[in-house]
Amino acid sequence: MNQKKKAVFNWSGGKDSALALQKVLQGNEFDVVSLLTTINEETLTSSIHSIPIELLTRQSESIGIPLYTVLFSKDLTNYDDKMRETVEHFKKEGVTHFIFGDIFLADVKTYRENQLNPLGIEVVEPLWDMSPAEVIADFIKSGIQSKIIVTQADKLGKTFVGQDLDENTINSFPNGIDICGENGEYHTFSYAGSLFKKKIDFSISQIHKISYDINLENGETKTFEYWQAEIIS
């Protein structure tokens, strides 16, 4: 019998991560030794989805795979050093692969490969090259339950925050929205389904608008606004 390759799964807490992880666990190629999540050291929430570390821990406990968190400064100036330290930590445990839940953003995949390949880590993308329609169809079939917790304010309104990502919600998206939210239109929190041994109870305490100033390649600065749910256990 071939020995499984040791891998770390880069866990966002959302639907794509959950679907990709379920596919990996159903296969027979990888031994996933840990979930890895990047955390804002000021807020103690995940970098993209703003999920509190307590709920991320409960996800990992319900899945049955330990969570490894890496704390970053808000400006990410220590990102490269922290990631190198993390890779070296897992290489000592025999890890050879890092798994992600990306779909089709080529620049993201290239970035990950450029960062990890020189360190001796191979990048694996279980959902790569699937169309958004195929990913959503697989997600619905998977039985994973996920709730929308972030929307890009100029793309999806505040009313979508707190909705379960199901066929009714997807069919109500306005035209021009990527149904997987791959362009940042929305983010989710996964809390139940066959991936989880126990449903994760949580609630939304409030929804508030946040904004980020992004420096574009042409030298301009653009402000992006989001509706963000504050979720609590």
Image (tube, rainbow, N blue to C red):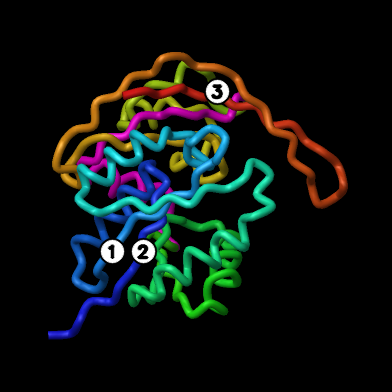
Task: Write the start and end of the magenta stretch as one range.
Answer: 129-153
Dot 3 and dot 1 residues touching (CB under 8 Å): no
The furthest residue to the right:
219
Rendered position, 79 above or below 166: below
Label 3 residue SS? strand
Q: Tell me whether the residue at label 2 lies in contact with that at label 1, contact meaning CB atoms closer than 8 angstroms.
A: yes
Q: Residue at x 58, y 69 (%)?
A: 115
For the N terminus, give its image quadrant: bottom left
Q: Measuring 37% from the left and 50% from the top, which residue is drawn there?
A: 17
Label 1: which residue? 33
Q: Which residue is mark 3?
A: 227
Which numbered disc flags the more N-terminal residue, 2 or 3? 2
Q: CA distance from mark 2 to mark 3?
A: 31 Å
The part of the image, by quadrant, that contains residue 3 is: bottom left
Q: Is residue 73 magenta?
A: no
* Marks 2 and 3 close (CB-CB < 8 Å): no
Q: Secondary structure at mark 1?
A: strand
**Left or right: 6 in relation to 176:** left
Q: From mark 2 to mark 1, how far is it between C-alphas?
A: 6 Å
Residue 127 in percent (x, y) is at 38, 59
The answer to whether residue 4 is left or right of residue 121 is: left
Residue 172: x and y in percent read: 42, 25
* Amino acid at circle 3: Trp
Asked where in the image residue 79 lies, by quadrant, the reply is: bottom right
Residue at 33 percent of width and 19 percent of height = 203
Instruction: Say if 190 sits above or below 114 in the image.
Output: above
Q: Residue at x 54, y 62 (%)?
A: 83
> What is the crowding at mark 1: few (fewer than 14 residues within 10 Å), some, or many (at least 20)?
some
